[in-house]
Amino acid sequence: MAGPLAGHRVIEVAGIGPGPFCAMLLADMGADVVRIDRQDGPAGSRQDISGRGRRSLALDLKRPEAIEAVLRLCDGADALIEGFRPGVMERLGLGPEVVRGRNRRLIYGRMTGWGQDGPMAKEAGHDINYISLTGALHAMGRAGEPPAPPLNLVGDYGGGGMLLALGILAALVERGRSGEGQVVDAAMVDGAALLMAPIYGMAARGRWSGRAGNMLDGAAPFYDSYACACGGFVAVGPIEPAFFSEMLRRMGLSEAEFEGRMEAANWPRQKQRLAEAFRAKTRDEWAATFAGSDACVTPVLSMAEAPAHPHLRARGTFTEQERTLQPAPAPRLSRTPSSLSRPPSLRGEHGREILEEAGFTPAEIESLLPNG
């Protein structure tokens, strides 16, 4: 298996959302990720893209022999990922004190919404709840409308799974010096707050005036999406003066109409003028108008259209595996590139080979079968 994490073993206790996304990132980078699925859990799907790159072992974690099997797998692992509420792994007998008591080099990655401690630590929640407490959700949306959820990209994936992957990689680097693993407490509420650091910085400098009144939240005429004649949209982002002038030149608009463009009082009028202008052509006509320029105007593509865009196609931003179109691994490393290895696994399909590799005898493997 290629990639910068080749030779590292990760045990993933199956969950949803950010945990699997973290495991996918590590698997793309070459880690051998073994997912512990519930015997009565989802059957799995070859189209579950975030499940790619790892093998599956299905166990009934209510049985002592299954818990012992997980512990034995962790004895030879570099990291473990779990995404339960605080205390669940401890009640199973798989908490960090037990697991790391047997393998001091193991990095124990914990993925939760609210964190391992604090008044709300054991409460339920989802992405929208975690970003709502950090100021992130309040900052998104149109004036006069409720805050707009940014899919579940900010809490689950950017502030959750990606932050857990970063923590595990940092712990691996530190382990190279100390020889010791550690616990990584990745909370989506912490990660969402961290992603807001630049915006809090703007607020501290007096450059943030609340939702829908700022340069980057759709209030400014030079940073928003506009409807076109065909019903499609273009994304407009020429913040810098030279880029804005290039956009106006290609649209046939005069600079005089947009004097004082950095003054918020002028934004409603200037946005209306741009909206009128963009409605004069189709999205694809505008895309051709701005092709090869520094105007920072691009078509808003659907998920069906994006993989066919010439730039993304040239870079291989999307790829296909098992006839399933999906985003390719990122970022790109020059000497040890990431790659797709295994397609998404079905529940338990690699159980025997995983246990055999770990040194389980045929009798021990038979004892772990559902009916004993």
Image (tube, grey):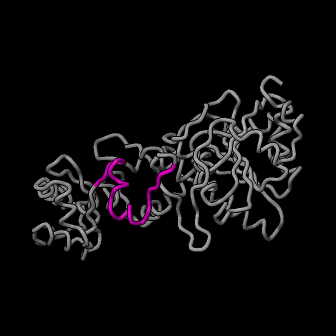
Residue at position x 62%, y 48% in the image: 187
Q: How many marks?
A: 0
Counting from the top left corner in percent of width and height, residue 186 is at 65, 51
Magenta-drawn segment: 300-321
Outermost residue, top side = 371
Residue at position x 83%, y 65% in the image: 179
**Location of the C terminus (image quadrant):** top right
Residue 1 visible in this rendered orientation of the protein: yes
Please tell me which residue lies in front, 25 or 322.
322
Please tell me which residue lies in front, 296 or 147.
296
- Horizontal side of residue 328 vs 224, given as left or right: right
Counting from the top left corner in percent of width and height, residue 255 is at 13, 72
Q: Is residue 47 above or below residue 171?
A: above
**Location of the N terminus (image quadrant):** bottom right
Counting from the top left corner in percent of width and height, residue 125 is at 56, 36
In magenta stretch: residue 39: no
Residue at position x 45%, y 49% in the image: 325
Residue 117 visible in this rendered orientation of the protein: no
- Horizontal side of residue 222 vs 12, given as left or right: left
Quarter of the figure with residue 266: bottom left
Please tell me which residue lies in front, 38 or 140.
38
In magenta stretch: residue 310: yes
Outermost residue, bottom side = 242
Q: Is residue 366 above or below residue 312?
A: above
Counting from the top left corner in percent of width and height, residue 25 is at 59, 55
- Horizontal side of residue 297 vs 53, given as left or right: left
- Horizontal side of residue 97 vs 174, given as left or right: right
